[in-house]
């Protein structure tokens, strides 16, 4: 497959991968260090939860705005704006003295990061051929995994020699370096589109009207993405608590399991892209089957609780579930929007679909914690089975309608 990738497409891919790496470097650093921050500020984690909530709400909601803007403004401008604001917010966090001010700064930071993904998909749809699309998407998605792995490994080491605020300032410095590279290279990389842009008529872009038949399959896909967000972030966020409470692992080892999930995601992106191209040739078929695999893995994890106590097997099964969710994320949020290229609405639908992930993540943070506290982890895992099964049913229901839409039947 890589023999078909031209040098320019490779350069575009790795530049956008670096941008997406910067997004995670400048966005999740606070969350990675939150235990240390609470200790230094003599606060409980619940006191700082508002800071992370502000970022999540602004990031998820901002996807809708970013999506709309990405089809109307230059996507390179939006990415530049996002990088500048994100770097400045990280610098501002170094000086933020109180939780309310930190919340405002980090909420703005959340919106800044919403300016990345929809414009990235718009750039890929304009400057990358169909043969290169899967190659590019997999590697850009790696940016999130590499950013997560880097922070979880680097932050504990840096915190031994400097305060957490200085670590965030270092992240701002790294983001500034990537911003300079972006400013220098983006104008050269994005100069000749591989697809013609719509002809403007009377100052407005001519757009092929969307058929009404697309409304129902898109609605079903959005609900499926909500399920994906619940499982991806829900299992990831609560895996350390599960491993600590169910198997008595020390908190440090339990938290380290999050790094294992990030490493596993690198393989997942490439694996599911390969499987879709060689076996399914359809993003919704691949997503539906992957949901089924996640439901089976969750069911095995549920049964394992009653048969044998194995921390290693439980960790592997949860890694499989999260890996499946990364594959579904790739299919439904990276591949589905390209079907809207003829309608010049790639960025719009990318932002709309991606926002559903964070609605699901917000639901999971509340619901999974409440279920675990009231009914225990076995009941929580059973809910994971149900959510994966519902996601599969939604994808299977949308499949014939979706094919009818993009095939123009």
Image (cartoon, helix red, strand yellow):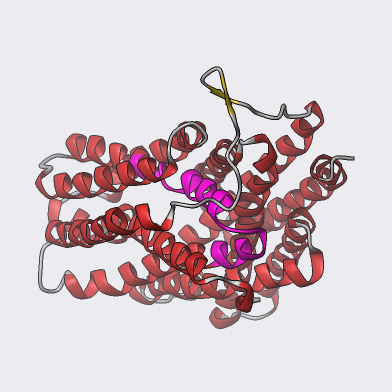
- Residue 123 forms part of the magenta stretch: yes
Name the residue rendered at 78%, 29% in the picture: 211
* Quadrant where the C terminus is found in the figure: top right
Depth order, front residue of 284/50: 284
Residue range in magenta is 112-138
* Quadrant where the N terminus is found in the figure: bottom right
Depth order, front residue of 94/133: 133
Name the residue rendered at 59%, 77% in the picture: 316
Name the residue rendered at 86%, 42% in the picture: 404
Please state if 376 lies on the left or on the right of 61 as rendered. right
Name the residue rendered at 61%, 36% in the picture: 345
Question: Can you see residue 55?
Answer: no
Residue 104 locus on image (x, y percent): 24, 34
> Which residue appears farthest toward the right when viewing the image?
409
Residue 240 locus on image (x, y percent): 44, 66
Q: Quadrant of residue 149?
A: bottom left
Depth order, front residue of 180/163: 180
Question: Can you see residue 3?
Answer: yes
Instruction: Judge whether 201 appears above or below 174 on screen.
Output: above
Residue 341 locus on image (x, y percent): 65, 43
Residue 103 locus on image (x, y percent): 25, 38
Q: Quadrant of residue 306?
A: bottom right
Q: Main secondary structure of the magenta part?
A: helix
Please state if 162 lies on the left or on the right of 115 as rendered. left
Q: Count the marks: how many?
A: 0
- Residue 126 forms part of the magenta stretch: yes
């Amino acid at each position: 497959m890589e023999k078909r990738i031209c040098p320019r497409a490779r350069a575009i891919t790795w530049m956008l991968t670096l941008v997406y790496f910067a997004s995670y470097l400048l966005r999740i650093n606070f969350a990675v260090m939150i235990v240390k921050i609470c200790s230094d500020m003599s606060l409980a984690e619940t006191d700082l939860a508002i800071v992370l909530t502000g970022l999540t709400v602004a990031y998820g909601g901002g996807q809708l705005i970013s999506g709309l803007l990405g089809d109307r403004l230059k996507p390179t401008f939006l990415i530049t704006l996002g990088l500048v604001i994100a770097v400045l917010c990280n610098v501002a966090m170094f000086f933020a003295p109180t939780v309310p001010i930190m919340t405002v700064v980090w909420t703005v930071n959340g919106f800044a990061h919403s300016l990345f993904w929809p414009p990235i998909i718009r750039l890929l749809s304009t400057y990358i051929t169909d043969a290169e699309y899967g190659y590019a998407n997999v590697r850009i998605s790696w940016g999130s995994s590499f950013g997560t792995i880097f922070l979880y490994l680097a932050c504990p080491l840096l915190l031994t020699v400097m305060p957490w605020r200085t670590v965030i300032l270092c992240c701002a410095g790294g983001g500034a370096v990537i911003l300079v590279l972006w400013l220098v290279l983006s104008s050269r990389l994005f100069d000749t589109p591989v697809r013609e842009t719509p002809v403007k008529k009377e100052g407005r872009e001519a757009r092929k009207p969307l058929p009404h038949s697309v409304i129902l399959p898109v609605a079903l896909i959005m609900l499926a993405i909500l399920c994906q967000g619940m499982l991806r972030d829900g299992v990831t966020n609560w895996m350390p608590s599960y491993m600590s409470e169910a198997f008595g692992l020390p908190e440090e080892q339990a938290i380290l399991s999050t790094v294992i999930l990030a490493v596993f995601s690198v393989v997942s992106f490439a694996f599911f892209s390969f499987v879709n191209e060689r076996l399914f040739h359809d993003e919704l078929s691949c997503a539906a089957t992957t949901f089924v695999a996640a439901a089976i893995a969750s069911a095995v994890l549920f049964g394992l609780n009653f048969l044998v106590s194995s921390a290693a097997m439980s960790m592997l099964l949860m890694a499989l579930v999260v890996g499946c969710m990364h594959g579904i994320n790739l299919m439904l949020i990276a591949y589905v929007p390209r079907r809207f290229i003829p309608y010049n609405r790639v960025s719009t639908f990318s932002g709309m679909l991606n926002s559903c992930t964070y609605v699901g993540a917000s639901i999971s943070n509340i619901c999974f914690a409440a279920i675990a506290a009231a009914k225990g982890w076995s009941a929580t895992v059973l809910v994971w089975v149900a959510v994966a099964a519902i996601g599969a049913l939604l994808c299977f229901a949308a499949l014939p309608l979706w094919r009818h839409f993009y095939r123009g039947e």
